[in-house]
Amino acid sequence: PHSSMAKNNIAVRDSNKGLAKKAASIAKMFASKRSRPLFVLIHNIDGVGLRNRFAQDAIATLTTNSRKDGSPMIRIVASVDNVNSAMVLWSPQVVHKFDWAWKKVHTYRPYLEEVKGLPNTESSKKVKKNKGNQKPGAATAILKVLAYLAPRHTEVLQGLAALQLSNSSNSVSYNILRDDCMKKMLTSSDTQLRNIIKELSDHNMMGSEKDDEGIEQTFIPSTIPLQDILDWKLNQPTF
């Protein structure tokens, strides 16, 4: 049985290596017959179906092997959902092949649709067990967004969750949150914190409003379990 399994693994590796060879052959043939470049648009190049080194190497091979007169005839235009894609998805060799020109084009829209199909995490399993007037499906999807946020945003959100739990309140004044973030060296200015709050609000993970006394209050919506946010590990794998 072990020998059979080893042969299967070798066959898979050989098949995947062949993928890059086929991509190189296609790219060279394309370049020899075309005078104008082809632009390939890939939405979410870090999606589940492409989230492996063989697929990424094959895509990169298409562009690096299609050069004609010094310029690639196959050019990749792609978007990523995970801000850490460059660190966790591509090796230095693949990055060199892609030769990306990076542009930040935020949509400022929640990732709920993108993460609905992701595998359940421990946190999402807890959400399903919670009772009350929560909507488990929505809470589960929102919690999965944590995997796609910048670490600093997650730390600010966890700080707010801790403050809400420690005070047994539904909200925390903006000034208290600001002082807590500066104390923990999460933010260095009011502008930086407000930008983070805006992004979290755009993802429906945080809100702010003024109370009857005109004091700005910040809060995590009641549909999101605060303890699950605190239990989220910043270094937990997302790929």
Image: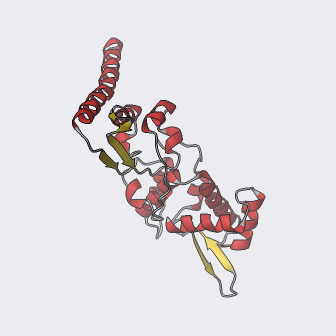
Give the residue furthest to the right. Answer: 183
Q: Say which residue appears at 60% left-offset and 56% top-offset.
A: 154
**Residue 182 in the image: above or below residue 218:** above
What is the quadrant of residue 167 in the picture? Answer: bottom right
What is the quadrant of residue 168 in the picture? Answer: bottom right
Give the residue furthest to the bottom. Answer: 212
Is 121 left or right of 32, judged from the image as shown?
right
Residue 156's x, y, as percent?
64, 59
User: Which quadrant, please, contains the N terminus?
Assistant: top left
**Residue 215 in the image: above or below residue 131:** below
Is 139 left or right of 234, judged from the image as shown?
left
Q: Say which residue appears at 63% left-offset and 72% top-offset.
A: 218
Q: How many marks?
A: 0
Residue 219's x, y, as percent?
61, 70
Q: Say which residue appears at 43% left-offset and 38% top-offset.
A: 98
Task: Please indicate, yes or no, whether residue 188 appears anywhere in the rendered image.
Answer: yes
Residue 135's x, y, as percent?
43, 66
Give the residue furthest to the top. Answer: 3
Residue 232's x, y, as percent?
57, 50
Task: Please indicate, yes or no, whether residue 170 appears anywhere in the rendered image.
Answer: no
Nearer to the camera, 225 or 117? 117
Structure colour scheme: secondary structure
Is 238 left or right of 192, judged from the image as shown?
left
Nearer to the camera, 176 or 197? 197
Nearer to the camera, 177 or 105? 105
**Residue 33 in the image: above or below residue 194:** above
Give the residue furthest to the front. Answer: 69
